Image (spheres, grey):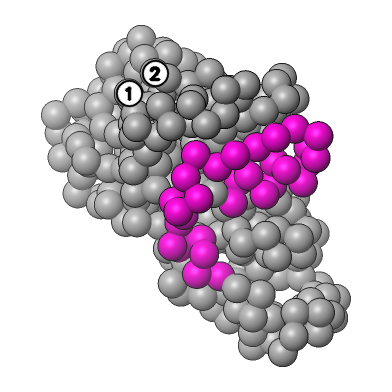
Amino acid sequence: MEMEKLIEEINRLKEERNAIIMAHNYQLPEIQDIADFLGDSLELARKAVNVEADVIVFAGVDFMAETAKILNPEKTVLLPTRRATCAMANMLTVNHILEAKKQYPDAPVVLYVNSSAEAKAYADVTVTSANAVKVVEKLDSDVIIFGPDKNLAHYVAKVTGKKVIPIPAHGHCYVHERFTLEDVERARKLYLNAKLMVHPECRPEVQEEADVIVSTGGMIKRAPEWNEWVVFTEREMVYRLSKLYPNIKFHPAREDFFCIGMKAITLNHIYESLRDMKYEVEVPAEIAERARKAIERMLEMS
């Protein structure tokens, strides 16, 4: 089916099903263009709370769709393809949390939303890269168990001055982990007037070279502060920023760094998802209830 016809059919099915499409900033441009809501993990979690539709088609990775389901147990949440998964979220197991709790029994468990619903059920509170510092600062403890991203854990520890224990020790996003100081040097040479905005999932040495360290939502807020940026995150963020601010120049730090899980979703998948009502996201009630408390606490604290 040609793209124009596909979009027409998606819109028809959306109306028929009383559905909305929520999409993350890392989605393909054509999916960003048809989304009803577009944002980072925190923005999408906030929007998911007040959705009036019967069906949410989640163009993101599996943990995001689970979060939408946890916050909307009575709604149908669809993930357009099962291949849309997050490698970092899959690195953290419940066992990692239980082992850390044995070692630090009084430390609160703070989990990045980039984690499974099962892991979230063991969290005291969840965070996103946009609010991790704010939430950890408010916790009445100087020692924090934090998973699954070691680089975000490093950033939170540096800004808050608290002892942050990363679980697992090697947890990372393979896209952000690949950025190096060579990429920073190349960016500075290629774009002499540009400033560097760096995601806190990047390595500490790359963070050190940043002009601003921000989540994707933070990138949107901070972009008007300067007229040219090199963006150290998943490449599709540049599309989102360029659409919002056509008069500002944005360059991806690396064109060839992208998230396979995010890119697994196509327009055709969205169409088939609405047509066949697949793949429905289910979270067992007991896990959902415990995870919801951690997510709601995050939303209250941020």
**What residue is disc 1 on?**
205
Vertical placement of residue 214 versus 77, above or below? above
Left-right relation of 65 to 203: right
User: Where's residue 272, x and y in %?
Assistant: 64, 84
Residue occupying the point 56% across, 59% down: 60
Left-right relation of 107 to 46: left
Cβ atoms under marks 2 and 1 closer than 8 Å: yes
Does the magenta run of residues contain 253? yes
Q: How would you rate the neighbour count of disc 2 (Cα within 10 Å): few for under 14, some for 14-19, many for 20 or more?
A: some
Left-right relation of 179 to 222: left
**What residue is disc 2 on?**
208
Left-right relation of 238 to 7: left
Quadrant that contains the C terminus: top right
Q: Which amino acid does label 1 sit on?
A: Glu
User: Where's residue 135, x and y in %?
Assistant: 50, 24
Residue occupying the point 46% across, 74% down: 82
- The residue segment tinted magenta is 236-265
Vertical placement of residue 125 versus 235, above or below? above
Q: How far apart are marks 2 and 1 (CA)?
A: 5 Å
